[in-house]
């Protein structure tokens, strides 16, 4: 049996020093969720996540009350969540409540009881503030968002226009899944009329034409997860999952037309949410008709993430969450974090000398790949490429779409396995363009040269530039490092030179 020693670290080496843990308890109309985060930072990483489907809002619009059994389940969940926060050492806890609690006659009484359990003030969000926080969640997690945000909860639908960090418009409508089920007496036909009438009053929806519609909320995530499984999509990551608007409209019509339990892959959706899929489909169908968006983009970041984002200093809000996440993984899993930073500068000089066109977004992704190039070094050499591909493809990364994260994963994959696709599945290739595969292979080839020279240690790469001069790809070692230019280095340099149509030369 292993014994605890005095030298055991007080903090796990796999944790970042980003301050004490923080947590949010979200008392929604359908579910109550606790999410605890490693700390309050630009790229907050959850360390615990649990939800209880209490159904507080299922009868509010017809009876005006939170159902007694739902209240019992909710308070029991809050007691457990409060204890868990104490166990995790959470120093700052936010508790928010949404549509059901603000609309129910007995909402204030429930909030008093919940406050006594949680030990902190409970912020009952107005419809406008809920809409704002949902939009800020999208701003925090989507790179340069441009479109309409729609947060569909159990009790309400919040809509906001967002472009970059600018928010405009704002509406809160009683069109959540439980609310529609209640108002329509479980009739999708009646729900269709209710949604149509409610959305007619939202004039700024017309501004969504040709832009994105950002779907936020558990029921829409369940709907899109079903779409993902039915289409055999190769990357099971909900954040930034994109469905063309025409395809989304056809799928919404299918879901509202048939019994949800008969749909293929329905087991991927929680049983409690299945009855609400039809109502979510009705709302989505009407939004697509009214706003005419180009595509539906799923945002896993919503009110909770927007709340944390709003609590950050302005300088922190301006940071790039993708770069931050890559730097964190670089610190946690690389042999030398400094080497990853040097690799950025080294490839900057290389790419500039090649004359290969590179957009600002492509450069950003290349920098991320450089930071993540060594995160699989502890794995068996035969599996470092595969492990890198899996970790990066499925990592908790904000600010990147699926093609972007696939590009980064492929670049690091090629750095390990060589400049061929090998056993790479066809599904992965379908997520990126031919240009992206070509750039990933070039970057992977450059990293193969770099790591063979430096052994992943800092201070060498700045002294051995890789540049294109006089039509040649030249690795400049100089007298001080001439002995590093062995046969393996020469072979890898030639492979890279062929990719960019140059001759290789070690100077």
Image (cartoon, rainbow, N blue to C red):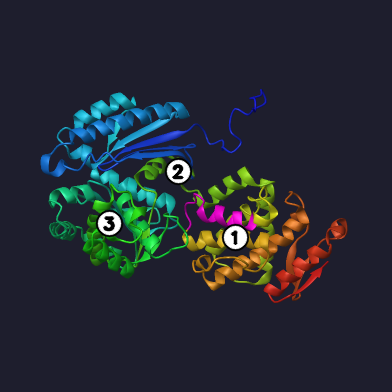
Residue 261 — which label?
3
Quadrant occupied by the C terminus: bottom right
Whether 273 is drawn above or below 288: the answer is above
Secondary structure beneath label 3: helix
Q: Is residue 72 magenta?
A: no
- In the picture of the structure, the residue carrying the numbered disc 2 is 314
Q: Are marks 2 and 1 in contact (CB under 8 Å)?
A: no
Secondary structure beneath label 1: helix
On the image, the x and y values in percent for residue 133 come to 33, 45
Between label 2 and label 1, give the one nearer the viewer. Answer: 1
Quadrant occupied by the N terminus: top right
Q: Are marks 1 and 3 in contact (CB under 8 Å)?
A: no
Q: Quadrant of residue 310?
A: top left
- In the picture of the structure, the residue carrying the numbered disc 1 is 366
Whether 469 is drawn above or below 376: the answer is below
Q: Earlier in the sequence, mark 2 or mark 3?
A: 3
Q: Which residues are magenta?
A: 384-400
Q: Main secondary structure of the magenta part?
A: helix
Horizontal relation, residue 300 to residue 419: left or right: left
Residue at image point 24% right, 41% down? 55
Q: Are marks 2 and 3 in contact (CB under 8 Å)?
A: no
Q: Earlier in the sequence, mark 2 or mark 1?
A: 2
Marks 2 and 1, how far apart at CA: 26 Å
């Amino acid at each position: 049996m292993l014994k605890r020693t005095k030298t055991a670290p007080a903090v796990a080496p796999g944790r970042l020093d980003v301050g004490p843990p923080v947590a949010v308890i979200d008392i929604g109309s359908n579910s109550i969720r606790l999410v605890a985060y490693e700390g309050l930072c630009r790229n907050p990483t959850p360390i615990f996540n649990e939800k209880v489907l209490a159904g507080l809002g299922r009868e509010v619009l017809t009876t005006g009350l939170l159902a007694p059994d739902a209240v019992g389940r909710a308070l029991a969940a809050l007691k457990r969540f409060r204890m868990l926060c104490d166990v995790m050492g959470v120093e700052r806890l936010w508790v928010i409540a949404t549509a059901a609690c603000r609309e129910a006659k007995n909402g204030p009484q429930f909030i008093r009881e919940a406050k006594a359990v949680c030990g902190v003030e409970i912020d009952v969000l107005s419809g406008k503030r809920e809409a704002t926080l949902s939009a800020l969640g999208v701003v925090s997690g989507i790179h340069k968002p441009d479109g309409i945000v729609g947060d569909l909860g159990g009790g309400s639908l919040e809509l906001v226009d967002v472009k970059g960090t600018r928010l405009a418009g704002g509406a809160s409508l009683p069109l959540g899944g439980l609310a529609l089920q209640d108002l329509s007496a479980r009739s999708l036909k009646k729900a269709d009329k209710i949604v149509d009438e409610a959305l007619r009053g939202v004039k700024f929806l017309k501004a969504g034409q040709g832009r994105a519609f950002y779907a936020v909320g558990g029921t829409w995530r369940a709907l899109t997860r079903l779409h993902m499984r039915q289409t055999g999509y190769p990357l099971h990551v909900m954040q930034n999952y994109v469905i063309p608007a025409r395809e989304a409209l056809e799928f919404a019509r299918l879901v509202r037309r048939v019994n949800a339990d008969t749909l293929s892959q329905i087991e991927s959706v929680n049983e409690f949410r299945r009855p609400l899929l039809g109502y979510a489909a009705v709302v989505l169908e009407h939004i697509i008709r009214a706003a005419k968006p180009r595509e539906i983009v799923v945002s896993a970041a919503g009110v909770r993430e927007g709340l944390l984002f709003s609590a950050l200093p302005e300088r922190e809000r301006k940071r790039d969450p993708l770069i931050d996440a890559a730097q964190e993984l670089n610190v946690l899993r690389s042999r030398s974090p400094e080497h990853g930073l040097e690799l950025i500068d080294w490839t900057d000089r290389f790419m500039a000398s090649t004359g290969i066109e590179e957009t600002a977004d492509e450069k950003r992704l290349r920098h991320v790949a450089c930071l993540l190039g060594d995160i699989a070094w502890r794995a068996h050499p035969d599996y470092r490429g595969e492990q890198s591909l899996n970790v990066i493809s499925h990592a908790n990364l904000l600010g990147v779409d699926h093609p972007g994260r696939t590009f980064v994963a492929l670049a690091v994959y090629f750095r390990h396995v060589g400049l061929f696709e090998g056993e790479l599945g066809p599904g992965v290739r379908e997520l990126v363009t031919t240009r992206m595969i070509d750039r990933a292979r070039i970057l992977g080839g450059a990293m193969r040269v770099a790591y063979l020279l430096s052994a992943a240690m800092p201070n060498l790469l700045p002294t051995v530039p890789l540049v294109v001069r006089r039509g040649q790809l030249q690795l400049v070692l100089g007298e001080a490092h001439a002995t590093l230019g062995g046969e393996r280095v020469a072979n890898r340099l030639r492979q890279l030179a062929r990719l960019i149509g140059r001759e290789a030369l070690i100077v």
